[in-house]
Every structure is written in C-alpha cells, then in structure tokens.
Image (cartoon, grey):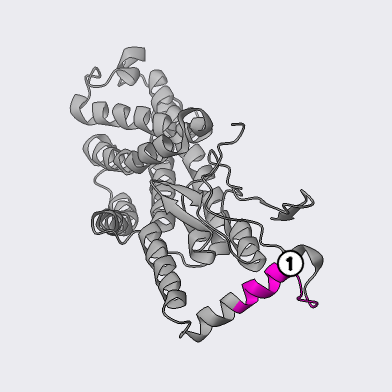
Amino acid sequence: MSGLTPYLWWLVSRASGILAMGAVSLAVLIGLTMSTKSMRRPGAKKTLLRLHEHLALVGLAAISIHGLALLGDHWLKPGLSGITIPFAMSYRPAFTGLGIIGGYLAALLGLSFYVRRRIGARLWRRLHRATVLVWVLGVVHTLGAGSDASAMWLRALLLITGIPIVYLTVLRILQGAFGKAPAEAARKRTAARTNERVDGQTNKRARSRTNERARIQKGVADELPASDRRILLRGPRRLRRAGA
Amino acid sequence: MIDASSCVAQGDCAELAPEAFEVSDDLSIVIGEASLEELRAAAEACPTGAITVIDEQTGEQVAP
C-alpha cells in the first residue's frame, strides 16, 4: 500500500474519470434511445428512465471526485483554481479546460431535471437536449488529457458507446428536422383516424372504436363496470400546470 | 389530467390514446376524449407518472 500512496489521488482521479465517462455515456445512450423511440416497449421506459437518472447522478458524483482528487496529486498540483476555472491548469490547458466546462454543463443540465417545475417543462426539455455536448466534451477531454487515452481498452469503450450515441443523435436531429418525431407521427395517426370516421366509417377498426365509444357514452354496456361507462376526458382542454 | 411539470414528452400517451393526447411544443396536452381502456394504458405507460385519470362524477382516481 505504501508503494501506492504517492499515486493514490492520481489513481482515484483516473478511476473516477473512467467511471464518469462510462456513466455519462450510458446515460446519454439511454436518453437518446428513449427520445428517438428506439425502444418500442412502453413498459420498459419506466425502468430506462430510472436507470438514466441514476447513471447521470453516478456520473455527476464521479466527475466531482475526478476533479477534487487531483487536489491531492503531488505531481500535477492544480490548486483549486486549476480544477474549477477552465483553461487555468498548466497541464494540457485546452483539454482540461474543456473537461471542466463539460463538468459544469453536466451539473447544470443534469440537475435541471430537479428544478423543472420551477423553470418549466418546455425550457427543461430544450436544455436537456444539449446534454449530448457533455458527452462530446468528455470524449475530447478523455482523449486529450486522460492518462489512459492511448490504452486500447479505453478507446474501445469510447467507440462501443460512441457509435450508437452518434447514430441516435443524428437520428434525433433528422426526426426533428423532417417532422418525423414521435409527436408528429402520433399527430398524423390522429388525423388519419379522424379522416377514417369522416369518410363514411369505411374502416372496420374505426367503426368498432366508434361503436365502443357510443356504448360507453350511453352507459348501456352491461358487461362494463360502472366506472368504465364514462368517457373521462370531454372536449378539447388545455393542460393545467400543477398547482395552477 | 397531465402534470405538466412531470411530463417529459416521451409521447407514449399520444401513441396509445392519440385522440386524447398530443405532444405539442415539447409537452403532452389533452386534445380530446378516448375510451377508458386507452386512457388507462396511457396513464400506466407514462414513464414519469404525469397522467392521472379521474372519474369526473365520483372524483375517484381510476388510473394509474
């Protein structure tokens, strides 16, 4: 153990940096999987969302340890300003500076999830889209300033997580640019179903759905429990904000 | 009812009950009516539990 002591903080920083990169990569990957609708099973989303959140928190904690551990490193001696002010560290200032910016961005974008009630869901969601920048900055920082940057296993890790992240990011951008986002697709399906009804009920499924609704509305469907006889949402209605 | 502050606009509700929900401008909104079965499915699928289905007459929570 005594042989490791001089390098302890450096080893802690390296290990936590690798953990941070892994956790952030997986969190971003899961987030993109959900936002691009690449996972079609609705039930799986609850699990994925929890995993996404916990990985992001692990990533944030690891980023903090990664920076703070360097304060104990006898060779680097970055000082508090070196680990908190971008480009102030003497060691590879450009790459360490980008890492620090990535860390701040991770904290800002990640923790904004917990204040989304205050800032509004729309603003939060727009901010959250920029989270992929944290991953980009992390990769640049790791390859440019990481002690293990030349190791094949680290490059393989970045490549294995990076390929699907880049693919899903491009997919997400294309979905947004060409209006094929899930919301748009759902809207088109809604319009299609409405047209089906307007066009003389020619579609069997549409006719079945309309009949089912009529049965429930009239409350004559004896096979249904009383609570099922009501349509709970009546007429166009704007959403209400909680507490409003 | 949709809790706007919990909604993360995943759009499952709009897929399962497209006549009742729509994702518009990064938020799910209520646009119309749907069968209870569809509303239940949408509420249960919502990953953040932002949808609550309440019986208008009894005030009882039906789903999730």
Q: Is residue A230 above or below residue B29?
A: below
Foreground pick, A133 / A46: A46
Image location of residue A31, percent across then percent down: 42, 51
Q: Amino acid at mark 1?
A: Arg
Label 1: few (<14), some (14–19) or many (≥20) C-alpha neighbours in 10 Å: many
Identify the main secondary structure in magenta: helix
Q: In the figure, residue A123 lies in which quadrant?
A: top left
> Left or right of A68: which side holds B55?
right
Mark yes or no: residue A17 visible: no
Residue A114 among magenta residues: no
> Left or right of A210: which side holds B27?
left
Q: Is residue A118 above or below residue A239?
A: above
- For the point 38% across and 35% down, the residue is A14
- For the point 46% across and 50% down, the residue is B9
Q: Which residue is mark 1?
A: A229
Q: Is residue B32 above or below residue A146?
A: below
Quadrant that contains the C terminus of chain A: top right
Please state the extent of the stretch shown in magenta in the rendering: A211-223
